[in-house]
Image (cartoon, rainbow, N blue to C red):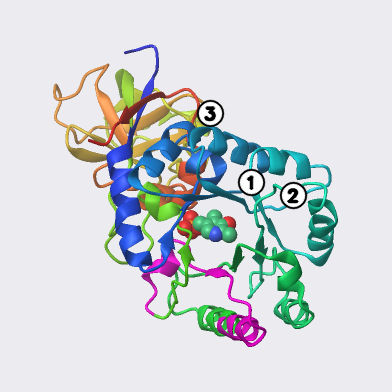
Amino acid sequence: MHNHAAILTIDLAALTANWRMLAQRSAPGECAAVVKANAYGLGIETAVPALAKAGCRTFFVAHLSEAIRVRAAAPDADIFVLNGLSAGQMEAYTAHRLAPVLGSMPEIEAFLAASNANPGIPAPALHVDTGMNRLGLRPDVARDFIAQGGLARLKPGLVMSHFVSAETPDDPVTATQIATMTSVVAHMESHSQRPRVSLCNSSGLFLDIAPTYHLCRPGYALYGGNPTPGKPNPMQPVIRLESSIVQIHTVLKGERVGYNGNFLATRDSRIATISCGYADGFPRNAGAKPGEPGGIAILAGREVPFAGNVSMDLITLDITDVPEGSVKPGDLATLIGDSLDIDRVGASGKTSGYEILTNLGQRYQRIYVQPE
Ligand SMILES: *Cc1c(COP(=O)(O)O)cnc(C)c1O
């Protein structure tokens, strides 16, 4: 077991339980799964079959390369590619039965021009930008497109938009986005077009004011992230990260630990050095500076603070308050798990839980807990 310094346990039973819970919230609409960025770091090849087996029929990814992997893992699923269609990709979309999410008039025209030669391509999605100003047709452009019979020509399988800050329920942009989407839907209906509609991401599914429409698109909450920051996390944790102690040693009062000596011992201290670092995706910003607390680990049932900088392959922990003899080299420290949920770990590294997930390292031993 010591070929790997750290162990990442991925609980596929918790993943599918989270999907079922979100599917209930999506009802009577459908619940998809967003599995971009290698299923938020968990691994497409394991997460997608587990979700498909639980009943998930629709997947979203960002890139064509990811979509091809999802197709191999879920032969019958509907797969949407959020970042859309680039020149020369039509054949691959058709061959793998992938649906592009189209978000600009040139992209739509290119799709329509190429779809004659590729009649097997699945119906695309149309992305309407209700405020993110990132991807999608501006609402006025979408209205013109609808008024000119564009939907009848394009025949989208889905019309979608994306929330700017659904995780902060008080942000007024959310109500504006909902109003814009409502008016686009009414405009489509007034032109006798009733494509399926999708709006909610994870946090959107927990907003009382957000309509769930026909399809919801959670990502983060599936993987155990808290869709309701500041409130108790309704999701089950999916990942646990543990790393073994390489050495324990004593530093004397006045000595320093790690690069740049950012930990100064204000008393004789015991330091445990564990085998995980920023090369494993653990944020370097979780390093502790004087007067600025950083990351936390759990050892012998106790939370212990990082001592100084996070190195490439190592983290030093101040275990002075852990009773001597209760930990030894080879023992595992928990970096993610129990009281250290991914939101808290993200905050301690001055980033988000999303980034903790998508940066999960490549040299962990990965253990998958299978659903019953
Ligand atoms: C990433 C993404 C999602 C999923 O968002 P979460 O906050 O992870 O639930 C949904 N829709 C779009 C367009 C996305 O880019």
Task: Identify the residue shown where x is 84% and y is 56%.
Answer: 110
| Of marks 3 and 1, the one in the foreground | 1
Numbered range of the magenta stretch: 182-208
Which residue does the numbered mark 2 point to in the structure image?
119
Magenta segment: does it hold 117? no
Whether 88 is drawn above or below 185: the answer is above
Mark 3: amino acid? Ala
Q: Quadrant of residue 252?
A: top left
Q: CA distance from mark 3 to mark 1?
A: 34 Å
Whether 196 is drawn above or below 90: the answer is below
Residue 182 screen position, x and y as percent: 55, 83
Residue 27 screen position, x and y as percent: 35, 67
Which residue does the numbered mark 1 point to in the structure image?
98
Callout 2: SS: loop
Q: Quadrant of residue 208?
A: bottom left
Which residue does the numbered mark 3 point to in the structure image?
279
Mark 1: amino acid? Leu
Residue 120 screen position, x and y as percent: 70, 47
| Of marks 1 and 2, the one in the foreground | 2
Q: Earlier in the sequence, mark 3 or mark 2?
A: 2
Task: Identify the residue shown where x is 49% and y is 30%.
Answer: 361
Whether 117 is drawn above or below 279: the answer is below
Whether 133 is drawn above or below 370: the answer is below
Q: CA distance from mark 3 to mark 2?
A: 45 Å
Q: CA distance from mark 1 to mark 2?
A: 13 Å
Which sits in the foreground, 68 or 221?
A: 68
Q: Is residue 319 visible?
A: yes
Q: Indicate left or right for 14 with 179 as reference.
A: left
Mark 2: amino acid? Pro
Callout 1: SS: loop
Q: Indicate left or right for 55 with 338 as reference.
A: right
| Quadrant holding the C terminus | top left
